[in-house]
Image: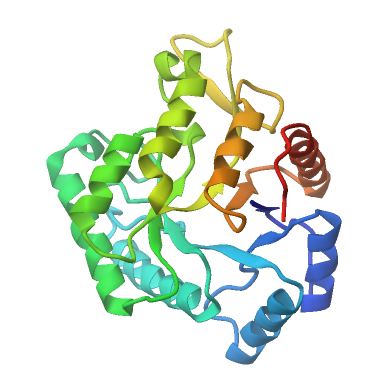
Amino acid sequence: MRFGGSVMLPYRSPKEWLAHVKELQYSAVIFPLHWSAPKALRQEYLSCIRDHDLLIGEVGVWKNLFSPDENQRAAAFSESIRCLELAEEVGANCCVNISGTPSHVWDGYHPLNYSKEIYDRVVETSQKIIDAVQPEKTAYTLEPMPWMCPRSPEENLQLIRDVDRPAFRAHLDYCNMVSSMERYADVHRFIETCFSLLAPHIRSIHAKDILVDQHILPLCIEEVAPGKGCIPFDLVLQLSHRLGPDTPVFVEHLPDHESYLNASRFIHKIANEANVPIK
């Protein structure tokens, strides 16, 4: 497997960016430039990545395709296409977004998120984005969310079937789908189910941790730094490794550079103890 995460420190050149990547012991990276960056600069970073045997695991979109604001909705659709084009240009494993929500919060809950109408829009919009680019090297993926399609590995698998495009694959974020105490209590089995159902389709993995806050009722499951919660990381890394030596596993949502350093040390320690090689 490959390991990576965000780069929080500023950089002004591929050389400065690479120094941060090496300190963090990343072998997988999120492409460090926006699609609007000059092509010559994109090629500089791409050459640096290739020269140092790094794998580009993701190009992120993170825009709400179903925003109630028409202008924001149109901009999100255009951004998704541009990001998928960038992912294809640089040979990223995937371009990743959320499916979308009618909420005024870009990634928020809305009762319509559970409707067939929204599910059908997810399918149709994903098809339109993929058909606009016709990617051959990368894939378009949707990160699972607690209250947004796909909310389970079963729904993710069905979505892959319904979108019915070779370039539509899976992005695995198991923590985002642990949205009930039943899944939390049996998180080992839930993680195994995620990998079992989605293994042939997984293009990138977010290795996150969660912990229930027993002081907040009726339910609060919080994301925490890797190693501070209930997730069996030895299992996550073993299952990730089985997918192949170039499977990217990313840590995310940490506040600063030191936190990413600590997360990297933790992941490498667990991988060593579990006899999982990190490329």
Q: Residue at x 68, y 54 (%)?
A: 4
Q: Is residue 38 visible?
A: yes
Relative height, residue 255 to residue 164 (above, below): above
Q: Position of residue 89 (x, y in %)?
A: 50, 81
Q: Residue 246: x, y in percent?
A: 60, 58
In the image, 253 versus 175, the foreground residue is 175
Query: Quadrant of the rendered structure where residue 245 is?
Result: bottom right
Which residue is located at x 65 percent, y 22 percent? 229
x then y, percent, for residue 279? 72, 56
Residue 167 lies, in percent from the top left, at 34, 66
Q: Is residue 151 visible?
A: no
Q: Quadrant of residue 235?
A: top right
Q: Nearer the viewer, residue 248 or 121?
A: 248
Rendered view: 81 above or below 231: below
How many numbered callouts?
A: 0
The type of colouring in the image is rainbow
What residue is at 63 percent from the left and 43 percent from the top? 253
Q: Position of 203 compared to 213: left or right? A: left
Tell whether 168 sits left or right of 125. right
